[in-house]
Amino acid sequence: MASVTCARRSYQTFFTRPRYRTVTSQAACTRQQTRWSSHAPSSPALLARGQKPVTIQTLQKMYADKSPITMLTAHNFPSALMAQEAGMDMVLVGDSLAMVSLGMPDTSEITLDEMIMSARAVSRAVNRSFTVGDLPMGSYEISPEQALASAIRMVKEGRMQSVKLEGGAEMAPQIKKITTAGISVCAHIGLTPQRQHALGGFRVQGNTPGKAMALYEDAKAVQDAGAFMLVLECVPPDVAEEVTNALVIPTIGIGAGNKTSGQVLVQIDMLGVRPPDSFMPKFVKRYGSVWDAGVAAIRQYKDEVIDRSYPTAPYVYKSDAKVTEAFKAALKGNESC
Ligand code: KIV
């Protein structure tokens, strides 16, 4: 296909001389298959539906406008499709994957390879929401170099647009190293589930004046190290609000009240995918009952298999009477040999 060059009007309003871009055909140009640089992927489906991908700039603008940022976890292709379809600004491949999707007792067991496999699946589904991949325990604490190597894998192999890691001031060198290499980092303080045994379990954090001050100092340290966003988990709402007001980056709360810059929940929890008697943190609101709907549907399937009401038309292919007759005759002939 011949390569043609066409001018972009909006660029011309910003630059004194016209800028040009190269596309594969004039038709592609009018369909707005814009590739902003030779390294930018074209995403005609998104542009055709008029949905612009969420970028760091989108998130910064939402923060400046005080517009709440919505984030939800996804651990596989269909859950990522659902999160995006429902309009989530951000999709997090959280290491909650270990417990809620893989049945591990805590998040310390999951490996970077396992996180990357999940991230790859999510990235195949998401082309509008901004993606964040969790760095699991053991993949970043040892040194800034180790953290950068893991972050690069999460971006290169997991196809995530940013990474998240747990910890405050002590993780500043890691955050600095990763962001300096051009990878955006979301920090995570308050309750840090990877350290649950050291914390004595899943407990509220920052609930004394001294602990609230330590939380604030951690928040400032990760911000100063270059984090673009901060998850605040299991923190009293007033403390979360004060920390949020003291920062210049958005805070995403989970169990931290409604005064943070946005919210995140674990999809499997909020959809009610787990049995009703499963342990559920206080802050989880069940917005669905997928468990009930799923078990009822599977029971009906079982009943219909047993009474042979499934599969009948319209779930079967057409039989051809002539083919059947010929087949039967051939079988009979076979038997008499
Ligand atoms: O792992 C996870 O899903 C998370 C969220 C709960 C913030 O870190």
Image (cartoon, rainbow, N blue to C red):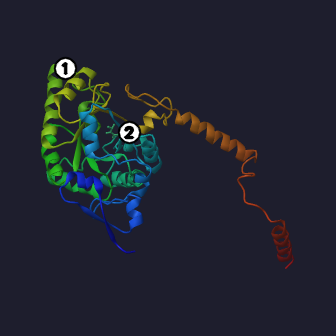
Within the image, what quadrant is residue 297 found in?
top right
Q: Quadrant of ligand 1?
A: top left
Q: Secondary structure at mark 1?
A: loop
Quarter of the image containing the C terminus? Answer: bottom right
Residue 335 location, x and y as percent?
Answer: 84, 74
Neighbours of disc 1 within 10 Å: few (<14), some (14-19), many (20+): few
Position of residue 246 in the picture relative to residue 251 (left or right): left
Position of residue 321 in the picture relative to residue 82 (left or right): right
Closer to us: mark 2 or mark 1? 2
Q: Amino acid at mark 1?
A: Thr
Q: Earlier in the sequence, mark 2 or mark 1?
A: 2
Of 170 and 76, the residue lying toward us = 76
Do we see residue 75 in this rendering? yes
Residue 4 location, x and y as percent?
Answer: 33, 70
What number of labels is visible? 2
Mark 1 highlights which residue?
208
| Real-space Cα separation, disc 2 to disc 1, in angstroms | 29 Å
Do we see residue 143 in this rendering? no
For residue 72, which numbered disc appears in the image?
Answer: 2
CB of residue at label 2: within 8 Å of ligand 1? no
Of 25 and 139, the residue lying toward us = 25
Quarter of the image containing the N terminus? Answer: bottom left
